[in-house]
Structure formats: structure tokens, C-alpha cells
Amino acid sequence: MTAGKAVFDASAILRAVLGLSPTAVAALSQGRTRLAPDLVYLESANALRRYCRAEIYSLSQAGALLEDITRLPIQVSAAKALAPAALTIAHERGLSAYDACYVALAEAADAPLVTADRKLAAAYERSELVA
């Protein structure tokens, strides 16, 4: 993992914040500029909702975790601006438009993409897969 800037997807951020992956914690803790599309917060909220439904976290615990995520120093880009490139990337690489948004941002920023999603990592050659 290199210094500079990196795009982080929700899977990597959640693994770091929840302490599920030392690799994700290390990636998020480096002095890089953190980038993400603005949908990262909704994807994080959706994942935390699943933890609530599985009774792993209470709603108040999930809310506190989401608040921690929203306080992270992340430079967000509007999904609206990324959508045209994401549509093409999604079509060409077999991704959801949501996942393609992260790739579009990484390509536009000439940055690596930090993710825990193997399919997403395989779709972008500069991905850093965190377990």
C-alpha cells in the first residue's frame, strides 16, 4: 500500500471501523488522502442495518458506528458526477452501478481502490484487497 491518495469502498471502511480486519485498519490509518463517492454512507448504513437484523448490533450501536464513519476524514465525490462513467464501467466489467462508482472515482483520481470485495477488486487492476 502506498502513500498519496486512495479510494475506499464501504466494505473496507466497515471492516476497519468494526475491527474485523487488521489490513483494513492499517489501510485506513495510513496518511493517505481518503476518497469515496458520497454513496459510501448509504452503503455503510445498509450494511449496518443488516447487522441489526441479524441481531449483531442494536440500532443505537449501529447508529454510533455510522456516526464514526461519517466523522472519518473522507473527501467525497458526488455520485451524480460519477454516474456516466459508472454506467459504462458497470456494463463493461459486470459490476453494479454502485460498485462501478468506486472504480470510476479511482480511475478519475488515478488512485488505488481499497476494498474487501473480491469481485470489485478483480474489476480494477490497481485494487488493494483487504481481508
Image (tube, rainbow, N blue to C red):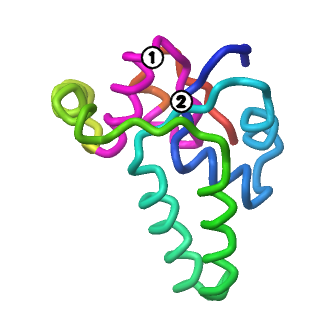
Q: Earlier in the sequence, mark 2 or mark 1?
A: 2
Q: 3 or 115: which is nearer to us?
A: 3
Q: Which residues are magenta?
A: 98-120
Residue 77 location, x and y as percent? 40, 36
Magenta-span inclusion, residue 12: no
Magenta-span inclusion, residue 105: yes
Q: Is residue 6 left or right of residue 125?
A: right
Q: Is residue 114 left or right of residue 40?
A: right
Q: Which residue is mark 2?
A: 7
Mark carried by residue 91: none
CB-based contact (under 8 Å), mark 2 and mark 1: yes
Rendered position, 64 above or below 102: below
Amino acid on which the number 2 mark rests in the picture: Val
Residue drawn at x 53%, y 27% is 113
Q: Which residue is mark 1?
A: 109
Residue 16 location, x and y as percent? 73, 50
Amino acid on which the number 1 mark rests in the picture: Ala
Residue 12 location, x and y as percent? 62, 44
